[in-house]
Amino acid sequence: MKKKEPRKSDRKERAEQPHGAGDERLSPIAVRASRLRRIEAMHLQEIEDNPLSPEQVAMFEMFEREAWSHERCRAYIRDRALELAGK
């Protein structure tokens, strides 16, 4: 049986929930793919003389270790940016 795609409104509501609410975890294969993309992106950032800070690397490693969904990662980064902008 084919799994139904969530409607756009459902995805938006889920993205507006606090991180962790209603999120699924990534599969081990998806985590490995995300890690490979991160390593490649980090390399490109270094080539452009704009490497990630140790805090940024630690944050992305946490996402991988905890197998956070992409939506949860984006919500975390957005919330953190808003928090820092408010200081």
Image: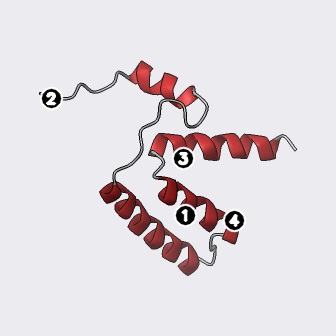
For the residues marked 1 and 4, what is the alpha-carbon distance in whole angstroms? 10 Å
**In the image, is residue 76 above or below residue 44?**
above
**Callout 2, which amino acid?**
Lys
Give residue 54's quadrant in the image: bottom right
- Residue 9 percent across, percent down from the top left: 43, 19
State how many labels appear: 4
- Residue 15 percent across, percent down from the top left: 52, 31
Instruction: Tell me whether circle 1 and circle 4 mark residues in contact (CB < 8 Å).
Output: no
For the residues marked 4 and 3, what is the alpha-carbon distance in whole angstroms? 15 Å
Residue indicated by mark 3: 73
Residue indicated by mark 1: 61
**In the image, is residue 49 above or below residue 68?**
below
Question: Going by the picture, which residue comes out furthest to the right?
Answer: 87
User: Callout 2 environment at 10 Å: few (<14), some (14 to 19), or many (20+)?
Assistant: few
**Callout 4, which amino acid?**
Glu
Which of 71/45 is in front? Answer: 71
Q: Residue 2 carries which label?
A: 2
